[in-house]
Amino acid sequence: MNIKKLFPGQQDDEEIILIVREHWFFMFTRVLAWFLFVLVLFMFDKYAPQYIPRLFEEPYLNFVNLGKNIYVMFLILGLFMLWTIYYLNVQIITNRRIVDIWQKGIFSQRISELTLPNVEDVTSEVRGFWSTVLGYGNVEVQTAGEKENFIFQNIPEPREVEKLIINQTGHYHGPAGNE
């Protein structure tokens, strides 16, 4: 039986309970900022011929068009990077562990994992007007030992994620502390 692996290091009998990404609001704000750069291009096309007409005459016109094409390529690359980093930054809760995949850039990724027996405490935090209205916040998973705590930032429904992790750690330990 060939089981498809959904993330690096997934074990054959490991069941994915939940996949969490940053709340859509943060991707929306980044795309809005990206649109400001698109707006710069439209403003240039609208106002530059009026105020700098010489740019649109030979021999400068070819350089202006080249510059605009390069600018558009960077706009497309920027949107691609926004989506890629948003999509690849993910926290995965399985029946055995918590995996945090953090994509720092296109060619830089950090994967951390925490087995459920090492979870000592889970705390969720919803702070501020927008996070309350839109239902996003942070979840901090405190670990046993010297390991860093796992912090899931700006995720949707943090209280539900907190409950799920607590339930999974309780399930993993079993009613008598062993399974």
Image: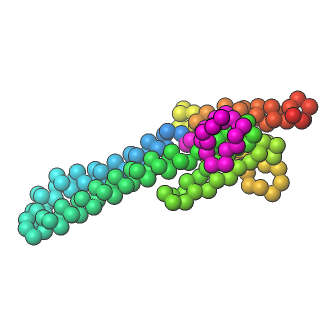
Name the chief secondary structure element in magenta: loop
Q: In front: 74, or 14?
A: 14
Is-magenta flag for residue 115? no
Please indicate whether residue 33 sits to the left or right of residue 106 in the image: left
Q: Residue at x 81, y 46 (%)?
A: 118
User: Which coloring applies here?
Assistant: rainbow
Q: Work out whether residue 151 can be spotted.
A: no
- Magenta segment boundaries in residue numbering: 1-22
Q: Quadrant of the C terminus?
A: top right
Q: In front: 8, or 60?
A: 8
Q: Residue at x 53, y 48 (%)?
A: 88
What is the x, y in percent for residue 82?
Answer: 44, 50
Please indicate whether residue 154 sits to the left or right of residue 68 in the image: right
Q: In front: 110, or 52?
A: 110
Please indicate whether residue 136 sits to the left or right of residue 115 in the image: left
Q: Residue at x 18, y 61 (%)?
A: 65
What is the x, y in percent for residue 134?
Answer: 53, 33
Q: Is residue 147 above or below residue 86?
A: below
Farthest residue, direction bottom? 59
Q: Residue at x 82, y 50 (%)?
A: 144
What is the x, y in percent for residue 142?
Answer: 77, 47
